[in-house]
Image (tube, helix red, strand yellow):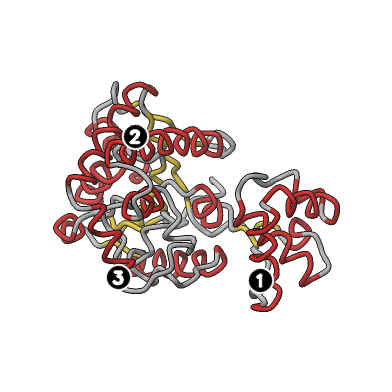
Amino acid sequence: MSLTEGRPPLVVLLGPTGVGKTELSLELGRACKGEVVSADSRQIYRGMDIGTAKATPAERAIIPHHLIDIRNPDEVLTVAEYQKLAYAAIATIHRRGGTPLLVGGTALYIRAVVEGLRIPEAPPDPTLRAQLEERLAQEGVASLFRELATLDPATAARIDARNPRRVLRALEIFLLTGRPKVELEGAQPPPYRILMVGLTRPRASLYTRIDRRVDAMLAGGLIEETQRLLDQGYDPALPAMTSLGYRECIDYLAGRCDLETTARRIKVETHRYVRHQMTWFRKLPNIHWFDLDEVSHQEIIAFVLSWLQH
């Protein structure tokens, strides 16, 4: 008997931004009574629709979607909170007799769900957080990373030294608990039978798709969406507002660059982000990769349906 026999299924659909996850997830969902559980750290935010390439309301009417539009742009969702919400959504889908489809490109969210990461419960301390944020602004991320490497070398070796949020949080956890972040972590795999489906395309093809999508976002109102968020009082320095696409539009609205430069910067930064995503995806085990320039949606759906039936 297989160790996973009798366990409810979870299908993971991952891949870099712009590869075509949304289109395939809708077709797959129709074929297997699927419901999407978003694994995208920006699609949680209300009012940030165009820049995060959310499924449209019409697309979300085709099959149910979970964990989209659950926070305002100035609210925090920790990975531990995301994990709990994702497990709750998956349980709801299973109770309905459906197939949960974990869809997205945020590797840490995907790992939190499929590996059952035990995430340190160290609620942010407002005073300490303010001090670290001030130091980050004054000294830069490199200074905080050097301190982290001294205090907690094991964690420092595992995180991106250029990611200010990850560096700040790891340092915060050590200063709050006195223990290395990795010491507080672990994993308790969830009780699912898991299929990992990875979507990719040749780099040149993917970049062409991304560039077209950026042009479509700008033509479709990304700058206006950014202006609305600013008009609602959201601070341009918020992590959500400094994310890809929005920070460039904020610079445009402030008169720091023209539209052509804005488009070019978003494209270049998205290409860089895709490379970063693929680096993380390659570290995940047991992924069945499909090149969407070579393999049809129907073939991938047939593969998933065959797995679900066995």
Residue 66's label in the rendered image is none
In the orientation shown, which residue stands out farthest toward the front? 255
Q: Which residue is mark 2?
A: 264
Q: Residue at x 22, y 33 (%)?
A: 298
Amino acid type, label 1: Arg
- Residue 98, by quadrant, is bottom left
Decide which of 309, 137 is in the foreground and name it: 137
Q: Name the element at disc 1.
A: helix
Nearest to the observer: residue 88 or residue 305 = 88
Q: Which residue is mark 1?
A: 129
Mark before the other along the chain sequence, 1 or 2: 1
Which residue corresponds to mark 3? 231
Count every numbered label the image shows and give the total.
3
**Circle nearer the N terminus (2, 3):** 3
C-alpha distance separating marks 2 and 3: 25 Å
Callout 2 amino acid: Arg
Q: Residue at x 54, y 67 (%)?
A: 78
Residue 70 point in image, percent of width and height: 37, 71
Left or right of residue 16: residue 169 = right
Q: State which quadrant residue 201 falls in.
A: top left
